[in-house]
Image (cartoon, rainbow, N blue to C red):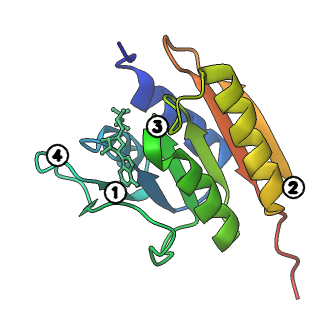
Amino acid sequence: MADKRRFDLFADFIVSRFVAPRVFDVAGGQGRLNEALTRRGRAVTTFDLRHKHLPVTYAQRIFTLEEPCDAELVVGMHPDGATRIIIEYAARHGLPFAVVPCCSDNGMPYNPWMRHLAELARGTGGFTTVEEVTLTMDGRARVLVGEPAPVAPR
Ligand SMILES: C[S@@+](CC[C@H](N)C(=O)[O-])C[C@H]1O[C@@H](n2cnc3c(N)ncnc32)[C@H](O)[C@@H]1O
């Protein structure tokens, strides 16, 4: 059973770590992370397929690499099949990402899945930092964070 505090804990982590005003919340389910981030002053779009969802900005569709980029940060809480896409999308657009992986998309157990995702992120060459942080919650609580190099002023 996933920890009900996960959205507030992840939202606190996100706002403490990133200044990004606009956030893509990928595989956001009903939109609870969106709600928590919106309360903290961020403009959030949730991508998922739920017909019943909270009254938040909600794109009711599958998130793909072709999604136009309208955010400064991409995040996902237990995004299952969207986990790799979050990392690949962030790399493609030069964005930071923060993802709390849960189930793998290929049957891989949790620890190898976490290592695989970190290698995937490093392998894109899009991030100067790829690191892990753990939220103080029950269940799958490890956050993989990737940050691109800051853009040099011209
Ligand atoms: C385990 S649920 C987690 C939902 C929510 N983040 C939470 O923590 O309760 C995984 C969600 O990922 C969504 N999902 C998987 N791949 C997706 C994709 N490519 N785009 C949008 N949603 C996706 C599913 O529809 C499902 O709602």
Q: CA distance from mark 4 to mark 2?
A: 36 Å
Residue 139 horizontal/vertical position (percent): 49, 14
The foreground one among 76 and 118 is 118
Pointer 4 or 2: first along the chain: 4
Amino acid marked by disc 4? His
Q: Is residue 104 left or right of residue 4?
A: right
Question: Disc 2 on helix, strand or loop?
Answer: loop
Say what amino acid the circle numbered 3 marks. Met
* Residue at mark 4 to residue at mark 1: CA–CA distance: 11 Å
Cα separation, mark 1 vs mark 3, equals: 12 Å
Mark positioned earlier in the residue sequence (4 or 3)? 4
Establish whether ligand 1 lies closer than 8 Å to the Cβ of label 3.
yes
Which residue is more in the foreground, 80 or 71? Answer: 80
The residues bearing labels 2 and 1 have C-alpha atoms spaced at a distance of 27 Å
Residue 77: image x %, image y %?
46, 37
Q: For the point 38% across and 18% down, which residue is it?
A: 2
**Residue of label 4:** 53
Q: Amino acid at mark 2?
A: Thr
Q: Label 3 to label 2, Cα distance in Å?
A: 22 Å
Mark closer to the chain start, 1 or 3 = 1
Whichever of labels 3 and 2 marks the residue nearer the N terminus, that label is 3
- Which residue is disc 3 drawn over? 77
| Label 2 vs 1, first from the N-terminus | 1
The image's mark for residue 128 is 2
Confirm if mark 2 falls within 8 A of ligand 1. no
CB of residue at label 1: within 8 Å of ligand 1? yes
Q: Residue at x 57, y 41 (%)?
A: 99
Q: CA distance from mark 4 to mark 3?
A: 16 Å
Residue 75, given in percent of the width and then of the height, sits at: 52, 49
Looking at the rendered structure, the secondary structure element under dot 4 is: loop
Q: Element at badge 1?
A: strand
Which residue is denoted by mark 1 in the rendering?
47
